[in-house]
Image: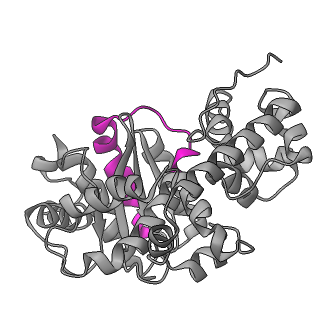
Amino acid sequence: MPEVSFQPDWFSKPGDTLLTLMEQRELTSEVLARKLGCERSVIQGLLSGAIAVDDKLAGGLSKYVGGTPSFWRTRQTKYIEALSRAAKAVPKETGLEWVDLFPHKDIVNYGWVDGNTKRDELIQAYLAYFGVNTPQEWSDRYERSMHETAFRTSPTFTSKVGAISAWLRRGEIEAAAIPCAAWHPERLRKSIENIRVLTKTKSLAYFMPRIRKFCAEAGVAVVFVRAPSGCRASGATKFISRNKAMVILSFRYLSDDHFWFTFFHELGHLLLHKSSMTFIDGEPGIAGELEAEANSFAANVLIPPIFGQIPEQFAQ
């Protein structure tokens, strides 16, 4: 298999190369984990940067996705060297104030960041997790975008942004590993009635893979991510690329009614609103016309005015 070229850019971690090769070979995290004889969480850790490429993984990745073992080892070494330089360039006081924004205990318990990381190394760990070069870059990517869209009316935004951004980031990492067709709103609209039929079943094992399949065929990756402390969101919607959207569901409320309403609410955002916007639902203080439209969409899908039909304004 031909050698994969290496661009020495720290911002592109080994997991970014892995994701590209997985997409080319149409490998899911589950399939690659089986081939490597490891847990799916290991693949997620590689994609997020939380798990380093060691000799064993380098050999397995070479065999199943491409490149040589030497390429993967070099990729990891160069990444760590450059990541360390970036972390050292951040003033220590500024960096530690930044990492204090995040609910570290939950993030470690969920396996998003290595639990053995010392406090002095946390700046580096969170730069890696968010895929940013500086705390300011994190702010530009998450804090500013959320403030301009979903949090326009929330008085508690500042105290929540760390937890919510960590949750969103985990969604991005998991969504990136889900193969999807290109974004196709019309295909999603046509699938809504088939998805609504799934509301009649109580089995998660039955309906979860099916809604994921319907959505992936329309360019939407559906992921289920437990919310950490400080994040009360039940769902969120964001485009992670021009042709791929994600819907994150937290299962914060375990009732069937709340789950389905949240799910169709998120689809409403995708179909009715601008793709440049991030929507986070379930947090106090988030309201407005766009939320009302998504609520109306969800309500009319679940209980159509004419039973069995999607309302005309949402079907076009």
One can see residue 261 in this view? yes
Choose top left, top right, bottom left or bottom right for residue 126.
Answer: bottom right
Residue 238, image x, y percentages = 34, 52
- Above or below residue 114? Residue 216 is above
Residue 203, image x, y percentages = 56, 71
126 and 30: which is toward the camera: 126
For the image, the number of numbered tags is 0
Q: Residue at x 14, y 53 (%)?
A: 311
- Above or below residue 270? Residue 249 is below
- Above or below residue 283? Residue 56 is above
199 and 138: which is toward the camera: 138
Q: Please state if 105 lies on the left or on the right of 219 as rendered.
A: right
Choose top left, top right, bottom left or bottom right for residue 304.
Answer: bottom left
The question of residue 187 being in magenta is answered with yes
Residue 97, image x, y percentages = 45, 75
Find the magenta span and give its range: 174-200
The question of residue 198 being in magenta is answered with yes
